[in-house]
Amino acid sequence: MTLAELRTALAKLDHLSGEAIVVLAKDSEGNAFSPLDEVDPSMYQAETEWSGERYMTETARQAKDDPDDYAKAPDGAVLAIFLWPTN
């Protein structure tokens, strides 16, 4: 899903109260759930069709005290929005 597709889906929910919580599923089967805790723009490098690795954006990496302690995103990594659960 792209950010544009997410925005479209969320726009359809404008009629709901802003107090509704956002909850993430642990997996596609719905085996567990956790409230959304953080929204994090980062870089994503797909390893397979269904999984990959997260890297800091270069701006975030350079803002660290020692940016060399953090791996640079590889060529081909794309900007992605990561949604982190509470648990």
Image: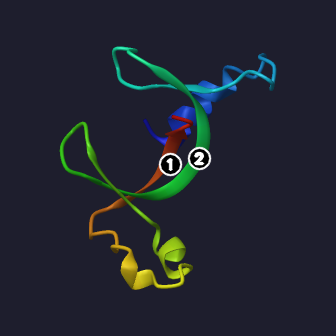
Q: Residues within 10 Å of mark 1 (few under 14, many from 20)?
A: some
Gap in angstroms between the C-alphas marked 2 and 1? 7 Å
Is disc 2 in contact with disc 1, using a CB cutoff of under 8 Å?
Answer: yes
Answer with the quarter of the image where residue 76 lies.
bottom left
| Residue receiving disc 2 | 39
The N terminus lies in quadrant: top left
Secondary structure beneath label 1: strand
| Residue receiving disc 1 | 81
Q: Amino acid at mark 1?
A: Ile
Residue at the location (25% across, 36% down)? 50
Q: Where in the figure is residue 14, as x and y percent of width and height?
A: 75, 23
Residue at the location (59% across, 34% down)? 36
Q: Amino acid at mark 2?
A: Val
Q: Is residue 38 left or right of residue 81?
A: right
Identify the disc placed on residue 32.
Answer: none
Against 20, residue 62 (above or below) is below
Q: Which of the marked residues, 2 or 1, is nearer the chain's N terminus?
A: 2
Residue at the location (77% across, 17% down)? 16
Answer with the quarter of the image where residue 6 lies.
top right
13, 62: nearer the viewer: 62
32, 12: nearer the viewer: 32
Q: Where in the figure is residue 48, as x and y percent of width and height?
A: 18, 43
Q: Is residue 40 left or right of residue 16?
A: left
Residue at the location (53% across, 56% down)? 41
